[in-house]
Amino acid sequence: MRVLGAVLAGGRATRFGSDKALALLEGRPLIAHAANVVHATVSKTVACGRDVAPEGMETIPDWPNPDLGPLGGVCGALRHAAAHGFDAVLTIGCDTPVLPTGLLDRLTSGGARFVRQTPIIGYWPTSLAEDLARHLSRDGDRSVRRWAASIGAIAVDAGEEIANFNFADDLDRFARRSVSPSPRR
């Protein structure tokens, strides 16, 4: 089973205030952290919706055009995967550098699945490429959650909170939480 990892990184990041894919966490861009999260589960990782990505990642455009939100990135990844012999795509947002243990195993256990709390994290068989392309061309609805429901995708509960950086301050709070001293016993 060949799985393509796709880091969705084409958003405008208006709430963040700058290109959050390149924002640094522990000295590395968020996009690199997200790629590392899926690395052991996939055959190859690409960055969706960007012209340039760090660490030599291949970039692919959103489909059918930019500014369609995460579904444009998912569609671009599915089309790329289908054209290059992958069986499925595992998507993650560039702003989710850490996932709960075991979550990726539950996502990739078969069929279309997505994380209930963060639906851009999902596992999508490449057979869905044309369905999603048709959906984007005929329907103005760009909600990942609603498209996933329309194809019968299974919602998987994360089991715990997923770090997601929508504002620059979120990085600072996460860094402080990560290095805070352990409570005394």
Image (cartoon, rainbow, N blue to C red):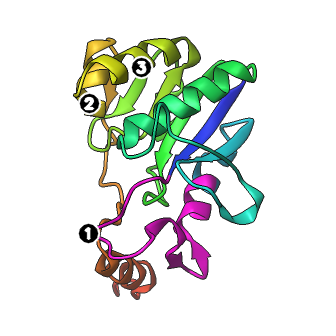
- For residue 21: magenta? yes
How much space separates mark 2 and mark 3, taking CA atoms? 13 Å
Q: Amino acid at mark 2?
A: Arg
Q: Does the residue at mark 2 contact the one at mark 3 (Cβ under 8 Å)?
A: no
Q: Nearer the viewer, residue 163 or 77?
A: 77
Question: x and y percent of residue 164 in the render?
Answer: 35, 60
The residue tagged 1 is: 15
Question: x and y percent of residue 130 in the render?
Answer: 49, 13
The residue tagged 3 is: 132
Q: Residue at x 43, y 60 (%)?
A: 95
Q: How many marks?
A: 3
Q: Bin the neighbour count of mark 3 within 10 Å (Cα to Cα): few under 14, some 14-19, many 20 and up.
A: many
How much space separates mark 1 and mark 2, taking CA atoms? 21 Å
Q: Please give left or right for residue 175 compared with residue 83 in the image.
A: left
The numbered disc on residue 145 is 2
Work out whether 113 lies above or below 19: above
How much space separates mark 3 and mark 1, taking CA atoms? 27 Å
Quadrant position of residue 53: bottom right
Among numbered discs 1 and 2, the one appearing first in the sequence: 1
The numbered disc on residue 166 is none
Among numbered discs 2 and 3, the one appearing first in the sequence: 3
- Which residues are the magenta region? 9-35
